[in-house]
Amino acid sequence: MRKHWILLLALALMAAPMISTTHAADTPKQGGVLVFGRGGDSPGLDPAFETDGNSFMICDNVFDQLVLYADESTEIVPGLATSWDISEDGKTYTFHLRKGVKFHDGTDFNSDAVVFSLGRMMKDKNVKYFKSEWAFPNEQPSPEYWLSMEMDSLVDSIVAADEFTVVFNLKRVEAPFIANMGMDFAAIISPAAYHKHGADFRANPVGTGPFKFVEWIKDDRIVLEANPGYWDGRPYLDKVIFRSIPDNSVRFLELKTGNIDICQFPNPEDIELAEHDPTMKLISQPGMNIGYLSFNHTKSLWQDKRIRQAFAHALNKKSIVDNIYYGLGQVAKNTIPPNMWSYNDDIEDYSYDPEKAKALLKDAGFAEKLKAAGQEKVTLWSMPVPRPYNPNGMKVGEAMQADLKAAGVDAELVTFEWGTYLKKQRAQPEEMDLFQLGWTGDNGDPDNFLAVLLDGMADPNVRTQWKNEQYHDLIMKAKQALNREDRIRLYREAQELIHEEVPLINIAHSLVVWPMKQRVMNFKLHPTASVRMHKAWVK
Amino acid sequence: MRKFILKRLLSLIPTLLGISILVFFMIHLIPGDPAEMMLGERASESALREVREQLGLDKPLYVQYGKFLGRLLQADLGRALRTNEKITTEIRERFPATVELSICAIIIATVLGMFAGIISATRQYSIFDYVSMVASLIGVSMPIFWLGLVLMIIFSVNLAWLPLSGRLSYYIQLETITNFYVIDSIITQNWTALKDVLWHLILPAFTLSTIPMATISRITRSSMLEVLRQDYIRTARAKGLSLWAVHYVHALKNALIPIITVIGLQFGILLGGAILTETIFAWPGIGLWILNGVYARDFNAVQGGTMFIAMVFVSINLVVDILYAWANPRIKVS
């Protein structure tokens, strides 16, 4: 039963854009309060140091970056920078800043604010101000995202050339750099407010965004109000209130009774209820993530690509998504999600075909190879915890085990406590044959999936440790190509290579479905999972 | 008396030391690398090294424990990893919510629980006795989670009498001074807020009160029954005192000692933060905060929070012990 309504729902959601155009006659109304119900509070509100979605949700509305992501994709559009030039060698980015923008505290936005906001995260603070000399804090938490995006090994210096021009000098050519500048950690904060509040800036954020921060009651609510002077037009809403309601069922009841307008992360059962409730509607968005099954590429057992292809034929991905994701997912044929640019839709996924799998395995002499390795079974490592890309690693593992059995392969499920799992997996031990894992994207750039997950030649930290020269070559070229068309072509080619070589089997992208009240208009879920209220309004 | 208190205070030292060892090693001996868990899929060797260094995980365990203990002696619980905020600040912001809820719950539990217990004892083997004792059994064993949701669906969704969750409606402004909303709304004479705050307290306080209520009613019943069998009660009846006077003046007063002890213990447990109740009712208290710490693998917060709760519990026990000794001098001697 469940499968059917989810299919219907998926169809209905696909048709949603068409329906919404008929509603376009509704002209946006100024004013009103929107209450957003979410699962937890923000740990902090200084974009440089946050790592939690609940923090970014607020930061997205209070701050702007030099560049922003487009409304419904991860395309880069102008933000606080109206335009940017890239030098011919690809190592110098010159940003031309928007003039006349003010921070919520009334101070001016200018190049020095950019230098301060980003420079404070740099290890060696190689920056030059134009006029003001904002001191950097002596002690601060580590800027997690700046570090994990390896910005220190990328950015050489940040220089304010004049009041409205900032130059970033890079240490190497890196096309995804511009996408990094759209991430939350690269948000521009008011240096004056930072110096006023010190470390407490994390509880008193001041930016240039469409909403101003008003009040924060810990673990209860955060209140934002419209910034009337916003450079991209005043938001329609007067106020947005983000309420923390940890229990999914209770949050949904709050939506039902009308105390909140949008309910984040409902239980799958409640989505069905929302479907039938005339006061509610649903929005959905594929998550920017991938759950996959990969091979231990350090073992000779997995070197023959026919064997890997056989495994791809053996798995019934659709059944996994229907029964374990409860439909809140979509079968993945590529490693990058379908709403990311350069997604190669021409690729035809391996069909679910146990017979073909058997034939391929026989062809490749898998049984003999297994015996030669002194094994009777293959081990299938599965995560012990739910992840954004996989609601139940063990259940998915069991389904895979049954699928493999049907293809004549005995698999043994193996799991460890999560920290141990990650640690052991990294070491690629002999006793690991297959492992499940996944990835949630950071900056909406294909490099952030394709390099991070599969280019084992570039980095020993790549989880799959797949080493393929042709692939490495494609990825390096794409990193250094400054022309967008070239990058698209290279990434499409890389996806073909992944399909052919099967270094991993793409299982699923999760699907985010949130119910909301009918009165909420023009609220869209963004692929990066950011929650933007600028253009939303209420009837 | 002073000697007794001093002795009890001194005995706190090994207790607290024991708790600190337990809390510290429980968290640090759990298998798995906290740095791996914090960084998840994106962990690189260099990032792992950095996090371990930052958390002091690269040092031997006894050094880490020594540091923890050293800070503890200066009443410094460290900083929460998740928010980089001082744990004492985090607790100060949230503990009033827990205390407010616990006081309401313990009042409901005491009034209703003692009432049921006394009636059951004075009418032993009556219908009321059976019903209330079965009810108390259910009360002890009822999953709070389920009860809370059922109450919400009845009183908030269907009848729409009471608010669903939270401490205060979002459209009501309240200037917070002590963070005890009841007190704050009285101080600022904000009667709209006071009504709203009390309204928000009813469901969670009642839900939270079920377990202590059941315990209190059972102990009241058995304690009363024991006293009612005493000779002096028979004497009181024989000399023609009214039943009311016998039960409430003579019997109850003597039956109170174990009841007070139980109420004190139950209150201590409630102050530890009712994780389930706080989660369902979105109550921004300390239980919810520690739970979030567990989810986020913020072991500084879990460690500091647990330590704080242990200290609160131990202190309440101490107060109960002292009260007990004061009420029953025989205790001191033993």
Image (spheres, helix red, strand yellow):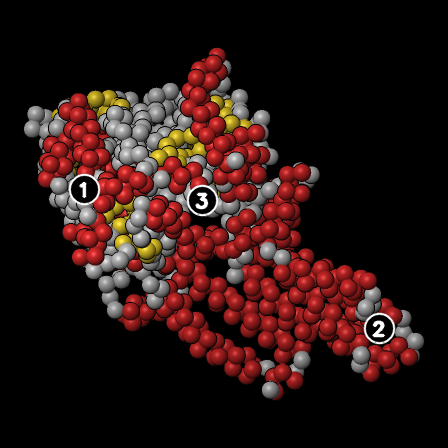
Image check: B108 left or right of A493?
right
Amino acid carrying label 3: it is Gly
Residue in view at x 54 percent, y 57 percent:
B274
A342 to B110, vertically: above or below = above
Check the image and report above or below for B145 versus A531: below
Q: Position of residue A397 (x, y in %)?
A: 36, 49
Question: Dot 1 lies on which element?
Answer: helix
Identify the residue under disc 2.
Answer: B246
The subunit carrying tag 1 is A
Q: Which mark is residue A40?
A: 3
Residue in the picture at 31% in, 53% down: A411
Check disc 1 and give the amino acid type. Answer: Lys
Residue A526 lies left or right of residue B281; in this view the side is: left
Q: Chain of mark 2?
A: B
Q: For the residues tagged 3 and 1, is the chain the same?
A: yes
Residue A168 visible somewhere in the drawing = no
How much space separates mark 1 and mark 2, taking CA atoms?
90 Å
